[in-house]
Image (cartoon, helix red, strand yellow):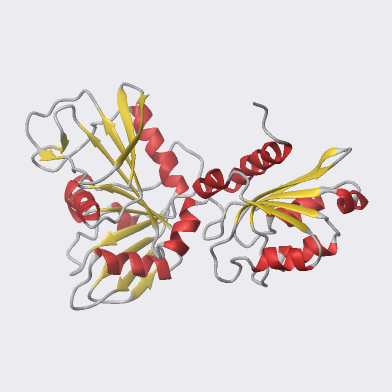
Amino acid sequence: MQASPDVLFMRRALQIARLGEGKVAPNPLVGCVLVHPEHGIIGEGWHPYFGGPHAEVNAIRSVHNEDWLRESTAYVTLEPCSHFGKTPPCADLLVAKGIPRVVICNTDPNPLVAGKGIEKLRSAGIEVQTGILEKEGAQLNRFFFTSFIKKRPFITLKWAQTSDGFIAREDGSSKWISSVESRLRVHSWRAEHQAILVGSGTLRTDDPMLTVRGWKGKSPVRIVLDPDLTLPTHLRVFSDPTSETWVLNQVKDESTGHLHFKRLNPLGFTLADVLDHLQKDGIQSLFIEGGSRLLQSFIDAGLWDEAFVFKSDVVFGTGIKAPVFQHHQFITSEHSGPDILQKFIH
């Protein structure tokens, strides 16, 4: 059965919204398509970077003849904002331009908006329809939605394990279980997330940089859990200025260059405390790469949203066992070079 015009145009809006991936956080990904009944698509726009003009503004700027707007429909992936932030309210702009119909994918979960944009449009006599491709829109902005609904960052777990179920050797080393293709995929995920976390054991053993390499995108903020500040200072997360490093600890607050020590509860802090701190600092997405104990602690606490597991044909015989899920939903399985990549959701 052929999709309706509303579905087709919203699908296009969702497609162009992705052009802002890795650049708009903590704002959401938003796309806008303007459609005239005779001339078809007359304008398109998306939110390109944090602090930049919103999708509706860019779409209207791209229109050749603004008189056409008074007969057009605006397809927007997220409810137009109704408050003054870094930019004026987009709902006011749509009203001012005389657009008679607005089709919206998702209502904004941000309490500053949360239905107020829709109310403002309807009060101005604009026909508003919501819920078109709602599931697709929620998936697109899962980081943004989780931040407001669960009051914590969206958490992605990732690990690679051998065919006999080990995540590392007896000494903790794990290079290289997964293939080149799989490792490149991991760098693409790093570029999508605002922050990345590995355990102190992995830092000591592998000394990873935790940056984006071989892939276009911004490196995530590196999160280090070091309560008593016992990690060696020569580690690359401390010496490499490519991206910021936040050291969550119980000792001090101090910042020098890319390195930021952030003092949490001096009597000890939990995973929930860590997530609460990151949430308050504007981190909406957290990528956790290991090691096994850290990953298992997030699984046991039920603090995860999706997980990617690479299974290789490498055999260790002995070593550190891979994490184990208690409750999960298996979604997909596909090849990643010679590896098998499985995706799970919580």
Q: Residue at x 64, y 58 (%)?
A: 79
Quarter of the view holding residue 297: bottom left
Residue shown at 31% from the left, 40% from the top? 329
- Left or right of residue 311: residue 73: right
The spot of residue 232 in percent (x, y) is 20, 59
x then y, percent, for residue 90: 72, 63
Q: Residue at x 18, y 27 (%)?
A: 163
Tell which residue pokes out farthest to the front in this image.
Answer: 1
Which quarter of the rendering shows the N terminus?
top right
* Residue 120 screen position, x and y as percent: 73, 68
Residue 172 rendering spot, x and y as whole percentages: 14, 43
- Vertical comparison of 55 with 252: above or below: above
Q: Quadrant of residue 110?
A: bottom right
Residue 324 can be seen in this image: yes
Q: Give 95 or 266, whichever is nearer the viewer.
A: 95
Total marks placed: 0
Q: Is residue 271 left or right of residue 98?
A: left
- Residue 304 or 337: which is nearer the viewer? 304
**Of residues 224 and 37, which is closer to you in this image?**
37
Between residues 264 and 122, which one lies in front from this camera angle? 122
Left or right: residue 170 compared with residue 244: left
Task: Look at the image and tell me whether residue 212 can be seen.
Answer: no
Q: Is residue 113 left or right of residue 89?
A: left
Residue at the spot 20% in from the left edge and 38% down from the top edge: 174
Q: Is residue 8 above or below residue 153?
A: above
